[in-house]
Image: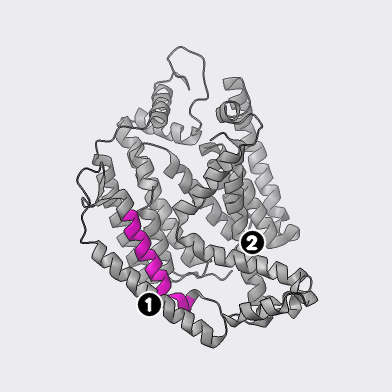
Amino acid sequence: MKTNKILTRFDWLLLTALVLGGLSLAAVSVSKPVHPAEDAAMLMRYAQHVSQGHGIVWNIGQAPVDGATDFLFMMALAGLYSLGAGLESTVIWMGAVSHLLTVLLVYFGIRRFFNGGILVALLSAVFLLFGPGLRYAEASFGTPFFALFCTLSWLGAQFVIEKPKKTWWAVIFALASLLMGLTRPEGVLISGFMLLAILFRLGWKQSRRVVMIFAGVLLLMGGGYFLWRWLYFGYPLPNPYYKKGGGQFYLDSLMESWKGVLELSFPFWLVFAWGVLCLFWGGFNRFALEANWFRSLKKSFLQVFEPQSRNLLISTLRVLGYLLLAGFVLGLFRQSSNLHVYLVFGRYSAQYAGLLAAMLVTGAIALTSSKWMPELNARNFEIDMVDQQQNDPKTVRFISDNAFIGIPITGFILMWVLLSN
């Protein structure tokens, strides 16, 4: 994983534009006459009682109840409310600002750690900025607040991988993971998946210090919180485990999780799917093609990436990109019906705005195909993971990167099988 350690002036200009655009959208969200969603309103009630000194209770005078699982978000909201801030406006602003900070961190992370170009980072940031994060904020959910700590934890993991001997970065990663777990219970699982990714990337020898610091922080500080909440509420695990989990597996939840990831990350998952395909193809080549099986399949597959075929494919994608961008520009002149509850920029329904954004992003990706489409040949697929010195190091790193990134993504999708849908 190469790093781009210095942001250019143009990067800072784009970041400034993202901040101004994000604040404008946040101001619009705060001013909307939107009532909090039911679950969000319940959390606000708990935060109000905490700020008034009654504890985490639903009704004043009753026993504590773990009804607000977004613990850190609830405590932050209670603290601001006790300082005189308005409850409903504060929760929306917390969500909106958290969403904007996440957008900026995504741009920074792509440029800093994943060797991404300015266009790739900008498209990703804009895609996230106009995504469902602000809708969660408008409904007064703490989801953007949780997403911010997930992003901070993942960036902390990147610093750890870059400098595994630096104790300070391991501590930052562990603390960010702790805060992520305090924000929502599933943050504990996500931090574990991130730690597995670090172990995969660095190996046990280089990861040993990181694992010890991670375990120390979570056992001491996280364990202290665990014991406190057990004594405070009278039961050890979060409420959703007893109400929606119970130690069973829910395949319908797993399917919903899979569909949600595909829907919310389109069209970016198409690019990642290509990397996963190469990952599995490399493993398949290791165990099958090296034994001279399916030689004709291998040859026909590689022919697609010969210089002539690759140039033809890139030209085709460019034509498709121009068509999509033309469709995007023409689509801007179409105004949605005023009967929609919410109109983006006062003109487009949320669904139509999503379609326009998808056309813009997909078109831009197609136009830049020559930058991201790999040049492959037979040697790229002849990988022996046992003796990497005889292989193309770029190919080995390419496969390793996709497996590394795929660990927390796969874990995130699978963990929802533990909760009822």
Residue 319 is tagged as 1
Image point 33% across, 72% down: which residue?
A: 323
Image point 36% across, 41% down: which residue?
A: 137
Q: Nearer the viewer, residue 398 or 71?
A: 398
N-terminal of the pair, mark 2 or mark 1, is 1
Residue 319: x, y in percent?
A: 37, 77
Mark 1 residue type: Val
Instruction: Report if residue 347 lies within the magenta region.
Output: no
**2 or 1: mark nearer the eye:** 1
- Using the image, determine if residue 43 lies above or below residue 293: above
Residue 42: which quarter of the image?
top left
- Using the image, determine if residue 133 lies above or below residue 303: above
Residue 366: x, y in percent?
A: 42, 72
Residue 125: which quarter of the image?
bottom left
Mark 2 residue type: Ala
Dominant secondary structure (helix, strand or loop) of the stretch shown in magenta: helix
Q: Which residues are magenta?
A: 353-371
Q: Quadrant of the N terminus?
A: bottom right
Category of crowding for the residue at label 2, using alpha-carbon neighbours closer than 10 angstroms: few (below 14), some (14–19), many (at least 20): many
Q: Nearer the viewer, residue 332 or 167?
A: 332
Instruction: Report if residue 364 lies within the magenta region.
Output: yes
- Residues under labels 2 and 1: Cα distance? 32 Å
Residue that protrudes farthest toward the bottom in the picture: 308
The secondary structure type at the circle numbered 2 is helix
- Using the image, determine if residue 161 lies above or below residue 390: above
User: Do callouts 2 and 1 mark residues in contact (Cβ within 8 Å)?
Assistant: no
Residue located beneath label 2 in the image:
403
Residue 89: x, y in percent?
A: 30, 35
